[in-house]
């Protein structure tokens, strides 16, 4: 039997519940709830908002194997939110409506599929959590060096990002995102990104898993020891993302982590005969956080991210 709502997150009894729920018509998603016998915080972990970011999905799948006796409080895992996107190996979008779920928050109860799924998360799921991790990575067409995004101006989210332990942490503004919407309903939230091009090697999966465990340790949900972060204080940055001025073939000029100055050429978009249609220059000084690796590019798509260190 498929339920429409998740079982309660807190019962005060040690338990493991797994299955599928149908929160809205036509959408069936897997879930796991692992509650320890001792009280503690409730940590929500989602993955597969983008269905082809496999490192994050595999990390969440492994989290489903945690045992009640290992934790205090409750761990709630939704490992593949965009299940059709996972099946169809979609990039960015939910196949049901062609929209990027991570731009649709807080959603609408009577909207399209992604808007309704976002609305369900914001109204039914997020408010029950004490902290939230939405796991991502570079999609099939993106490479990146790991970083964690948090909603700027939220100190509790910043503390979670620091605890996760990735050396680069992005203070992000903007609307429409999972973690921004969760933060607005009072839940400290971060969005870690590890691995790119859909790759899910053991090293990157364990890097992401270690980050989740560091957060669980910092919340008092697991006892140590956990592998310490490579640095005590990460580098806090803001991110600038130029979008493609035209369709065409994308020839990036910088590699991941390369330094860039204002005015540096970041790449060119050419037509098939080699005519330069657009030269993309940096408006910021900083370093390359991620970039599009596909040769094909469409107008309006994000080309890359430049991280600019914040004065500390
Ligand atoms: Zn993503």
Image: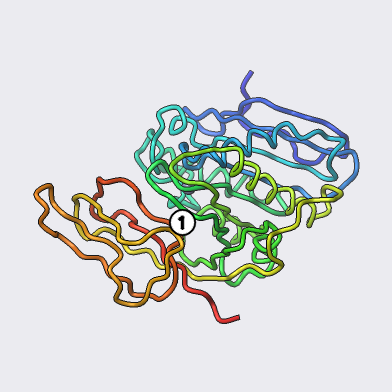
Q: Check the image and name the residue furthest to the bottom.
A: 311
Neighbours of disc 1 within 10 Å: few (<14), some (14-19), many (20+): some
Q: Residue at x 34, y 77 (%)?
A: 262
Residue 65: image quadrant is top right
Q: Quadrant of the C terminus?
A: bottom right
> Which quarter of the rendered picture does the N terminus lie within?
top right
Residue ID at (18%, 62%): 278
* Callout 1: CB less than 8 Å from ligand 1: no
Q: Is residue 131 above or below residue 20?
A: below
Instruction: Tell me: 156 left or right of 305.
Output: right
Q: Position of residue 289 (x, y in %)?
A: 46, 61
Q: Quadrant of residue 168?
A: bottom right
| Residue shown at 52% from the left, 70% from the top | 237
Rendering coords of residue 177 (x, y %) = 49, 55
Position of 69 with respect to 229 (left or right) is: right
Relative horizontal placement of residue 69, taking residue 76 as reference (left or right): right
In the displayed orientation, state which residue is furthest to the right.
38
Residue 46 left/right relative to 199: right
Q: Which residue, given by chain and number where applicable, does mark 1 sit on?
A: 176
Judge by depth and name the residue closer to the eye, 285 or 80. 285
> Residue 144, percent across and down?
46, 53
Front residue of 45/223: it is 223
């Amino acid at each position: 039997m498929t339920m429409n709502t998740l079982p309660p997150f807190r019962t005060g009894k040690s338990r493991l519940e797994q299955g599928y729920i149908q929160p809205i018509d036509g959408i069936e998603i897997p879930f796991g709830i692992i509650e320890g016998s001792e009280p503690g915080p409730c940590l929500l972990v989602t993955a597969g908002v983008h269905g082809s970011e496999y490192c994050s999905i595999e990390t969440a799948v492994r989290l489903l194997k945690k045992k009640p006796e290992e934790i205090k409080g409750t761990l709630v895992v939704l490992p593949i939110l965009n299940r059709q996107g996972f099946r169809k190996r979609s990039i960015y979008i939910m196949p049901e409506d062609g929209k990027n779920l991570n731009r649709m928050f807080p959603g609408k109860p009577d909207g399209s599929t992604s808007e309704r799924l976002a609305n369900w998360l914001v109204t039914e799921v997020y408010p029950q959590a004490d902290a939230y991790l939405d796991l991502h990575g570079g999609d099939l067409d993106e490479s990146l060096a790991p970083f964690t995004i948090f909603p700027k101006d939220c100190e509790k989210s910043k503390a979670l990002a620091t605890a996760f332990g990735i050396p680069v942490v992005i203070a992000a503004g903007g609307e429409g995102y999972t973690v921004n919407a969760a933060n607005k309903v009072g839940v400290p939230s971060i969005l870690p990104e590890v691995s790119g091009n859909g790759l899910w090697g053991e090293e990157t999966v364990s890097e992401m898993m270690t980050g989740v465990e560091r957060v669980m340790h910092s919340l008092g949900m697991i006892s140590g020891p956990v592998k310490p972060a490579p640095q005590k204080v990460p580098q806090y940055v803001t991110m600038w993302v130029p979008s493609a001025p035209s369709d065409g073939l994308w020839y990036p000029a910088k590699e991941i982590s390369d330094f860039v100055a204002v005015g540096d050429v970041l790449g060119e978009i050419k037509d098939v005969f080699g005519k330069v249609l657009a030269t993309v220059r940096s408006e910021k000084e900083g370093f390359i956080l991620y970039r599009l690796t596909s040769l094909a590019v469409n107008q309006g798509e994000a080309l890359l991210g430049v991280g600019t260190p914040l004065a500390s």
